[in-house]
Image (cartoon, rainbow, N blue to C red):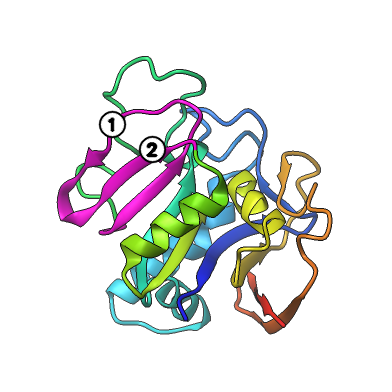
């Protein structure tokens, strides 16, 4: 049965998945430096050059059997509120790395955005249950990946929809920002740690439903 999966969510030791005041200059928020995701960029380079390793393995898994993607508006771009226009087309250029249908949660709708390489962004204000249903339909039997950010992952955890959650725990304390596991109630009940392994850069934890 197809699964709803989350991969490569980097958090600090004190549980922060984003910094404060996310904007164009600080897409991950203030205090959440690029070093937090350096492990992933290095793994992508290693994979492209044919090298292997713990981080490479986890990046590769995130792309296996994915037929559609879900993300929050904060991940799609830095704007807040109504769109000033429709010139913003994402962080990734004309050929985004998704190559499937991507459903973007937003209170401010705009027409679907068709990109090169098979990526189409759909902007929706529907409940998470309905968006998941649409994403599974688009995935045509494959799994669906939630790309982030933290608030979007929280919504799907609260709704009890996530089957697998992969965290990359970076060894630092941030002290402020957006915590991944805040305001969840019983949203984390029923999960177990199926894998816990460390590279030189991060510790990977994979949570799955019991």
Is there CB contact under 8 Å for labels 2 and 1?
yes
Q: Quadrant of residue 129?
A: bottom right
Q: Earlier in the sequence, mark 2 or mark 1?
A: 1
What residue is drawn where x is 72% and y is 62%? 171
List x then y, in percent, for residue 16: 72, 49
* Position of residue 70 in the picture relative to residue 47 (left or right): right
Q: Is residue 201 visible?
A: no
- In the picture, the disc for residue 73 is none
Q: Which residue is mark 1?
A: 111
What residue is drawn where x is 76% and y is 46%? 174
Viewer-proximal residue, 29 or 35? 29
Q: Quadrant of residue 210?
A: bottom right
Viewer-proximal residue, 127 or 210? 127
Residue 175 lies in magenta, yes or no?
A: no
**Mark 1 surroundings: few (<14), some (14-19) or many (≥20) residues within 10 A:** few
Q: Which residue is mark 2?
A: 123
Circle 2: element type:
strand
How many numbered circles does the render carry? 2
Stretch in magenta: 98-125
């Amino acid at each position: 049965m197809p699964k709803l999966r989350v991969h490569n969510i980097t958090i600090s030791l004190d549980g922060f998945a984003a910094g404060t005041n996310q904007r164009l200059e600080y897409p991950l928020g203030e205090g959440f430096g690029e070093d937090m995701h350096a492990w992933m960029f290095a793994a992508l380079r290693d994979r492209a050059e044919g090298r292997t390793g713990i981080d490479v393995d986890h990046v590769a898994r995130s792309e296996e059997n994915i037929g559609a993607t879900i993300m929050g508006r904060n991940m799609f771009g830095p704007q807040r509120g109504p769109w000033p226009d429709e010139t913003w087309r994402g962080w990734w250029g004309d050929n985004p790395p998704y190559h499937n249908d991507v459903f973007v949660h937003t209170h401010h709708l705009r027409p679907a955005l068709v990109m090169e390489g098979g990526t189409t962004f759909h902007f929706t204000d529907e409940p998470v249950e309905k968006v998941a249903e649409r994403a599974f339909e688009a995935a045509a039997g494959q799994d669906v990946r939630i790309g982030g950010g933290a608030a979007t992952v929280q919504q799907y955890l609260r709704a009890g929809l996530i089957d697998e959650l992969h965290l990359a725990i970076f060894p630092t304390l941030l002290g402020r920002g957006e915590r991944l596991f805040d305001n969840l109630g019983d949203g984390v009940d029923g999960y177990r740690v199926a894998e816990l392994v460390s590279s030189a850069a991060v510790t990977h934890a994979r949570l799955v439903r019991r």
